[in-house]
C-alpha cells in the first residue's frame, strides 16, 4: 500500500522528511509521496532516508490555489523537482506566503492580539509559511487554547484576521506542474464539491483525482472514483498527514493500493 499525500517541516507538518519516512516504515507502507505546500525541499532528504530503510519516495508537491475566493489544492507528482526555473517559481510563491503572513499578523495586532512575525518565522523554521504556524504562535501567546480555535476565531476563511492567499489559479498550477513533467491531480475535491470546476480543470489538463482522503466519506470517494474512471484519470489518495499537528498522526490511515501509483509510474516510464 502507499500514502501519496504527506506534509513535513518543509511546509506546515511537524515531522521532518526523514522522520516521516521512518513512520512510513513503521506502518509498513511500500511507498509515500512527500507533498508539501508550495515546496519540494523535503523530497531529496526523504528519498535519502527511503533508500536507507527501503521505502519508495515519490516526489510531489501540493500547490495552494484560489478559485473564486475558495481554496483549491493541486497535487503534482513526478515533476522535474531539481529544475532551477521551477525552484525559482516556487521561491516566488513562498515569498507571497511571507507577505500574507505579515498582513495576517498586522491584522491580529490591530485587533488587540499582539504577535511577533519573527516568532512565526521561527516556528516555520524555513518551511513554507502557513496559517498553522500563525495558529501555533497564537496558542503560545495564550490568545487561543487550541489550533482549531485559532482558525475559527481569527484566521479561518470567515474570520476577522483572514487574508486570502496569492492569486494562483488551479489552472495555472495545473499548467506549471505539466510544464515541469509532473502529473497534476486535484487534492481532496470533497472539501468544496464543485464538479463543474473539475470539468474545467480536466479540460485544462488535469490528469488525476485524489479519490481517497480523510475528508471524504465512502459516498464521496465513490463519486470521485466514478468521475476519474469516466474521464480516464489517475486515481490517488493519502492521509494528508501533518505529523500530528491536527492532534494525532494520520499516516497509515488512508492508504491506496500500489497499483494506483504503478499506473502513474508506467505513464512516466518509471515502471
Ligand atoms: P495556508 O496554506 O496558509 O492557507 O494554511 C492552510 C493549512 O492550514 C491547511 O493545509 C491545513 O494544514 C491547516 N488548517 C486549515 N484549517 C485548519 C483547522 N481548522 N485547524 C487546524 N489546521 C487547519
Ligand atoms: Fe497543510
Ligand atoms: Fe490540501
Ligand atoms: Zn495537504
Image (tube, helix red, strand yellow):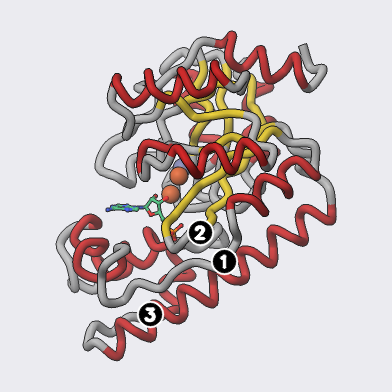
Q: Nearer the viewer, mark 3 or mark 2?
A: 2
Query: Mark 3 vs mark 2: which is more N-terminal?
Result: 2
Say if 48 sits above or below 120 in the image.
Answer: above
Q: CA distance from mark 1 to mark 3?
A: 20 Å
Residue at 28 percent across and 84 percent down: it is 114
Query: Mark 1 vs mark 2: which is more N-terminal?
Result: 2
Would residue 243 appear left or right of 232 to someone viewing this image? left
Query: Where is residue 142 drawn, in percent x and y?
Result: 18, 71
Say if 86 sits above or below 54 in the image.
Answer: below
Crowding around mark 3 (Cα neighbors within 10 Å: few <14, some 14 to 19, many 20+) is many
Residue at 76 percent across and 19 percent down: it is 267
Camera-side residue of 64 and 204 = 204
- Give the residue furthest to the bottom: 110
Camera-side residue of 246 and 23 = 246
Query: Where is residue 102 drawn, in percent x and y?
Result: 46, 80
Mark 1 C-beta closer than 8 Å to ligand 1: no
Residue designated by label 3:
105
Query: Where is residue 119 drawn, in percent x and y?
Result: 41, 74
Mark 2 C-beta closer than 8 Å to ligand 1: no
Residue designated by label 2:
66
Residue 88 lies in quadrant: bottom right
Would residue 109 appear left or right of 238 to someone viewing this image? left
Camera-side residue of 28 and 79 = 79
Q: CA distance from mark 3 to mark 2?
A: 21 Å
Crowding around mark 1 (Cα neighbors within 10 Å: few <14, some 14 to 19, many 20+) is some
Q: Callout 1: helix, strand or loop?
A: loop
Please report contact status of discs 1 and 2: CB closer than 8 Å, yes or no: yes
Residue 47 tag number: none
Q: Quarter containing ligand 1?
A: bottom left
Residue 167 tag number: 1
Q: CA distance from mark 1 to mark 2?
A: 6 Å
Camera-side residue of 33 and 69 = 69
Amino acid at each position: 500500500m502507499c500514502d501519496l499525500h504527506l506534509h513535513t517541516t518543509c511546509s506546515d507538518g511537524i515531522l521532518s522528511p526523514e522522520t516521516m519516512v521512518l513512520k512510513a516504515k513503521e506502518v509498513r507502507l511500500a511507498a509515500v509521496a512527500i507533498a508539501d505546500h508550495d515546496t519540494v525541499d523535503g523530497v531529496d532528504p526523504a528519498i535519502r532516508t527511503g533508500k536507507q530503510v527501503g521505502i519508495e519516495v515519490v516526489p510531489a508537491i501540493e500547490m495552494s490555489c484560489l478559485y473564486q475566493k475558495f481554496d483549491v489544492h493541486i497535487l503534482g507528482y513526478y515533476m522535474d523537482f531539481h529544475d532551477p526555473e521551477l525552484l525559482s517559481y516556487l521561491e516566488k510563491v513562498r515569498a507571497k506566503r511571507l507577505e500574507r503572513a505579515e498582513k495576517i499578523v498586522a491584522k491580529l495586532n490591530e485587533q488587540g492580539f499582539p504577535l511577533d512575525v519573527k516568532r512565526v518565522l521561527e516556528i516555520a523554521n524555513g518551511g513554507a509559511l502557513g496559517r498553522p504556524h500563525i495558529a501555533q504562535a497564537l496558542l503560545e501567546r495564550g490568545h487561543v487554547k487550541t489550533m482549531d480555535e485559532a482558525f475559527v476565531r481569527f484566521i479561518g476563511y470567515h474570520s476577522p484576521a483572514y487574508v486570502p492567499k496569492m492569486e494562483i489559479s488551479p489552472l495555472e498550477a495545473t499548467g506549471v506542474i505539466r510544464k515541469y513533467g509532473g502529473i497534476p491531480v486535484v487534492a481532496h475535491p470533497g472539501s468544496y464539491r464543485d464538479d463543474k470546476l473539475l470539468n474545467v480543470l480536466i479540460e485544462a489538463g488535469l490528469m488525476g483525482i485524489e479519490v481517497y482522503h480523510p475528508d471524504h466519506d465512502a459516498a464521496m470517494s465513490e463519486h470521485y472514483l466514478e468521475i476519474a474512471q469516466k474521464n480516464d484519470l489517475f486515481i490517488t489518495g493519502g492521509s494528508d498527514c501533518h505529523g500530528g499537528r491536527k492532534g494525532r498522526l494520520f499516516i497509515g490511515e488512508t492508504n491506496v493500493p500500489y497499483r494506483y501509483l504503478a499506473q502513474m509510474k508506467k505513464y512516466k516510464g518509471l515502471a
